[in-house]
């Protein structure tokens, strides 16, 4: 861990978090990005960011069938390098504090990250995407089509 991972900014509040282990997740893959430090990760991804690769492990790779029909997918991942004990945070871009649940910070009690990304292509068990915002080697929890693709259309106006 670097100092930025363990330091507390002014006005932040940490608590003693319970030991992890109260839930079980099965990582279904691994995310490959050029980002090796948190400071390199773009905030909430960038549409013009670098191509990244999402590797899906067997047997879950069979679940990719039909994913190429979607231009955008939602990626859920485990922020395994994040601290889990801050309840009040002071984002680096402001002097104001916020509760953790009012932020998209990777520092969370259950560090689950989500990102809506552009699906560029499928190469076997690898999805090539753009707009990711996580570190190289991040464990993958799940993938879902962009929810807007399934949203009901507004009724026609009279």
Image (cartoon, helix red, strand yellow):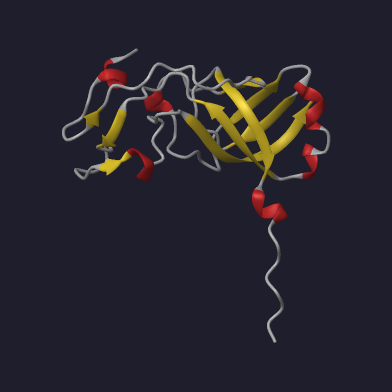
The residue positioned 36% from the left and 22% from the top of the image is 83
Instruction: Provide residue 1's location: percent of width, then percent of height.
Output: 34, 12
- Residue plotted at (32% across, 25% down): 85
Quick check: 2 above or below 72? above
Relative horizontal placement of residue 151, taking residue 112 as reference (left or right): right
Front-most of 95 and 130?
Answer: 95
Find the residue positioned furthest to the front: 22
- Quarter that holds the C terminus: bottom right
At 50% from the left and 31% from the top, the residue drawn is: 112
Quarter residue 68 falls in: top right
Relative image position of residue 140 (x, y in whole percent): 61, 24
Q: Position of residue 49 (x, y in %)?
A: 53, 36
**Residue 105 in sight from this viewpoint:** yes
Task: Evaluate whether residue 133 shows in this view.
Answer: no
In percent of width and height, residue 40 lies at 41, 26
Q: Nearer the viewer, residue 57 or 19?
A: 19
View extreme (top): residue: 1
- Asked where in the image residue 47 lies, by quadrant, the reply is top right
Number of residue marks = 0
Give the residue at the far left of this rendering. Answer: 10
Please tell me which residue lies in front, 26 or 130. Answer: 26
Q: Is residue 66 left or right of residue 112?
A: right
User: What residue is at 59 percent from the left and 21 percent from the top?
Assistant: 25
């Amino acid at each position: 861990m670097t100092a930025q991972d363990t330091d507390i900014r002014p006005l932040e509040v940490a608590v003693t978090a319970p030991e992890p282990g109260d839930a079980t997740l099965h990582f279904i893959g691994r995310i490959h990005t050029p980002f090796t430090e948190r400071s390199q990760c773009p905030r909430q991804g960038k549409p013009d960011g670098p191509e990244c690769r999402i590797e899906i492990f067997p047997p879950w790779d069979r679940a990719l069938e039909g994913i190429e029909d979607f231009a955008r997918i939602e990626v859920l991942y485990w922020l395994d390098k994040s601290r889990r004990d801050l309840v009040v945070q002071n984002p680096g871009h402001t002097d104001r504090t916020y509760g953790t649940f009012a932020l998209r910070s990777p520092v969370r009690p259950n560090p689950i990250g989500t990102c809506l990304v552009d699906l560029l292509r499928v190469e076997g068990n690898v999805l090539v995407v753009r707009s990711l915002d996580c570190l190289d080697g991040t464990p993958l929890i799940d993938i879902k089509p962009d929810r807007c693709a399934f949203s009901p259309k507004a009724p026609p106006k009279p």
